[in-house]
Image: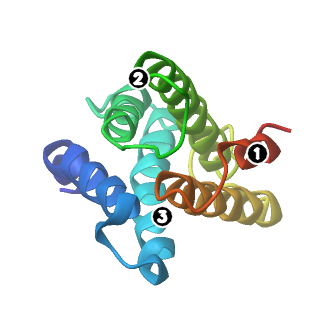
């Protein structure tokens, strides 16, 4: 039943959550929105680890998140429209890759949630902080350079 819901509504859920982070939803609700995005990504990672043969693969969910991010406007990046588009597209791709890396910290090799609670908690916290910072960048409240800390 959950598989069908993720397949049917996953893309729409991701689009709505990302749009909310971009300005439609008050900042105090961002952690809950981040949890929702995390849950969809985590679900795809666990399903892939358990090799359930679902159509909702990690690549599909990755594309959902990336497409949602591409529609997100970033203020104050680049001096020309072309430079802005190149910079933001590259940055968004890196952000999505980092989100999946942080979500994967809570998935063990055998499938399911990791037994390493500390690594999973750290990954989820980094995931939420990255989305919060990305939302602030999109609103022009933070410099794009602040994302460099997540790539270390």
The residue at which mark 3 appears reads as 34
Residue drawn at x 42%, y 32% as measured from the top left? 62
Answer yes or no: do the residues labelled 1 and 3 have beta carbons within 8 Å? no
Answer yes or no: do the residues labelled 1 and 2 have beta carbons within 8 Å? no
Where in the figure is residue 116, as x and y percent of width and height?
A: 79, 59
Residue drawn at x 50%, y 30% as measured from the top left? 88
Answer yes or no: do the residues labelled 3 and 2 have beta carbons within 8 Å? no
Whether residue 3 can be seen here = no
Q: Secondary structure at mark 3?
A: helix
Q: Please identify the quadrant where the C terminus is shown.
A: top right
Where in the figure is residue 43, as x and y percent of width and height?
A: 43, 50
Q: Earlier in the sequence, mark 1 or mark 3?
A: 3
Q: Quadrant of residue 125?
A: bottom right
Q: Nearer the viewer, residue 92 or 140?
A: 140
Where in the figure is residue 53, as x and y percent of width and height?
A: 33, 28
Q: Is residue 77 left or right of residue 129?
A: left
Q: Residue furthest bottom?
A: 28
Q: Secondary structure at mark 2?
A: helix
Q: Please identify the quadrant where the N terminus is shown.
A: bottom left
The residue at which mark 2 appears reads as 81
Q: Nearer the viewer, residue 137 or 105?
A: 137
The residue at which mark 1 appears reads as 150
């Amino acid at each position: 039943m959950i598989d069908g819901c993720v397949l049917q509504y996953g893309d729409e859920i991701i689009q709505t959550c990302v749009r909310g982070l971009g300005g439609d939803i008050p900042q105090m609700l961002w952690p809950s929105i981040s949890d929702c995005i995390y849950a969809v990504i985590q679900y795809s990672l666990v399903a892939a680890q358990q090799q359930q043969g679902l159509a909702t693969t990690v690549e599909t969910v990755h594309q959902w998140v990336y497409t949602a991010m591409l529609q997100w406007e970033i203020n104050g990046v680049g001096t020309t429209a072309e430079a802005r588009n190149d910079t933001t597209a590259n940055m968004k791709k890196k952000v999505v890759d980092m989100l999946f890396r942080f979500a994967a910290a809570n998935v063990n090799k055998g499938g399911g949630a990791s037994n390493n609670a500390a690594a999973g908690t750290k990954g989820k916290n980094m995931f939420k902080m990255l989305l919060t910072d990305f939302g602030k960048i999109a609103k022009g409240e933070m410099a794009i350079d602040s994302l460099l800390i997540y790539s270390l």
